[in-house]
Image (cartoon, rainbow, N blue to C red):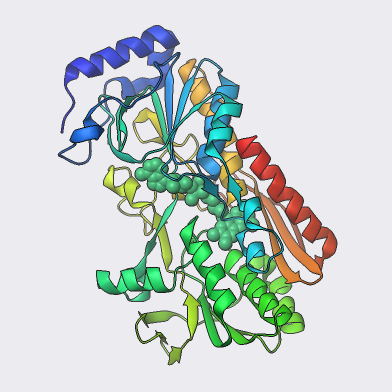
Amino acid sequence: MKSPGKNDGFVRRQFLQLAGGSALAAATGTALVGGTGPASAAISGRTNRPADLPAATGPRCVVVGGGAFGATLAKYLKKENPKFDVVMVEPNALYMSCFLSNLWLDDLIDLNTLQHSYCDAARSNGYVWLQGKLIDLDRDAKRAYTSEGYIDYQFIALAPGIDYNYASIGITDPAMAAACAQNFPAGFKPGSEHLSIKGKLANFEKGVFLTTVPVGNYRCLPAPYERACMIAAYFKKNKIKGKLVLLDPGEQPFAPKAPGFLAAFKELYPDIIEYRPSTTIKSVDPIKKTVTTEFETIGFDDAAIYPRVRAAKLIEDLGLSDPKGPQMEADIDVHKYFAKGDRTCYVGGDCRPMPFSKSGNTANSEAHYVAKVIAATAAGKDVDWMSPQTICYSMVNGKPEEAIVVKAKYDKGKFGFTDVELDNKRSPALALAAHEWGAGLYRDMFA
Ligand SMILES: Cc1cc2nc3c(=O)[nH]c(=O)nc-3n(C[C@H](O)[C@H](O)[C@H](O)COP(=O)(O)OP(=O)(O)OC[C@H]3O[C@@H](n4cnc5c(N)ncnc54)[C@H](O)[C@@H]3O)c2cc1C
């Protein structure tokens, strides 16, 4: 469905009045005359009526997704320019954190620590939370179609996170993919998957619990190894006669932290963790509970199977993906985050194409920068590139709590690691720092 040019003109006029015409036109360049129409057809019903929102009080910025990137961006857009009228579109009733969730598996934190209220975040930071889902986007008309109605915007930023690619582990039949996702969820998307894995552990009495590492740049590179440690710690503490089998296509765990993880596997869990590097999954049978690698077929009693990730399908559906990218990430300017040729539409977080670590701290620090980019663009100015900051603690022991850590920034050219700080000697001090880091990140996103 193509929006009429009438609306297009109205939105542009309104934006120019609100933001100061000539500066903005210079800053937004082709976006004021270009962009693309909606990606899909047949928008109807509720979606084709205006969303029930207060009238815009300034240039309207729509943020899609209330994760580490989106929640931070919504807050910091208001800080960068209090005149921005910010609406965050997020379908979930509350935020449930992926980062720190492995600690919950061994009861080192409670569920409350992971959960945060979108009402409170929006109220504290002066933006509006619309509980709904982005369905389509008309970038010519600058109109976002959501499950709750459409929103006309001056700027939009999308951060819908990741989806899984089950074909990457040999599952092409949709019924089998659904069975695998439901019976053995990966636990790398927020919400139900984590609850499911926690329940599986509570009911696990003996046998093989299988976990896997995907290929590619997957969400949180150290997390599968941290999870293996936390599940093993839970088995040890509760005297469960279980074996944790970890299949890894790589030759060793995530490189900077490999010594710390390998020491933990060997010294803390020699009879529990069976780590199998250089093992690529060829197929999975979620009904017979088997995984076939290039060497053998392995049976399991329960599992959390993590396929290769890809950018959320929404990014592809809206025509924002780079079709040449193996993970269908967004085709954006890699320094300024706008969709190529459109300075009113931005994409960030784990669906970015840059090879940064797909992690919460990275997305949070990146959102601080993108808020500055959008505010500067609205004012006809520019800002210097700022590197995201990756900070990743991994809890490797539960009793006593001990962690390892890596921190890094990125160079502006090929985005390789710079300013690396690494500590692979597990310690209670780093475990304490991990809790403090998590609390600080939640504060920065929501308080
Ligand atoms: C087990 C585990 C451990 C981790 N440990 C760490 C760690 O120690 N350190 C670290 O820094 N990171 C860690 N991470 C990674 C971190 O959680 C993610 O990288 C981060 O959450 C990515 O943020 P995001 O905003 O891109 O995506 P998300 O946080 O996934 O947010 C995406 C949001 O978009 C919403 N959405 C999707 N589709 C739509 C739509 N159509 N309309 C509107 N909204 C939509 C979703 O509901 C979701 O709320 C870990 C992750 C896991 C799973």
**Residue 369 sits in quarter:** top right
- Residue 10, given in percent of the width and then of the height, sits at 26, 13
For image coordinates 24% across by 27% down, the residue present is 49
How many marks can you see? 0
- Residue 84, given in percent of the width and then of the height, sits at 49, 19
**Residue 51 sits in quarter:** top left
Q: Look at the image and tell me in which quarter the N terminus lies.
A: top left
**Residue 202 sits in quarter:** bottom right
Query: Which residue of the protein is positioned furthest toward the bottom in this rendering?
Result: 296
Above or below residue 271? Residue 423 is: above
Residue nearest the viewer, comparing 155 with 83: 83
- Drawn side of residue 407 relative to residue 219, left or right: right
Residue nearest the viewer, comparing 117 with 355: 117
For image coordinates 16% across by 30% down, the residue present is 2
Q: Can residue 10 be seen in this view?
A: yes
- Drawn side of residue 411 relative to residue 2, left or right: right
- Residue 352, given in percent of the width and then of the height, sits at 45, 47
Above or below residue 20? Residue 387 is: below
For image coordinates 36% across by 21% down, the residue present is 29
- Drawn side of residue 324 relative to residue 260, left or right: left
Above or below residue 315? Residue 394 is: below
Q: Can residue 331 be seen in this view?
A: no
- Drawn side of residue 34 relative to residue 154, left or right: left
Residue nearest the viewer, comparing 282 with 108: 108
Above or below residue 269? Residue 166 is: above
- Residue 124, given in percent of the width and then of the height, sits at 61, 28
Q: Look at the image and tell me in which quarter the C terminus lies.
A: top right
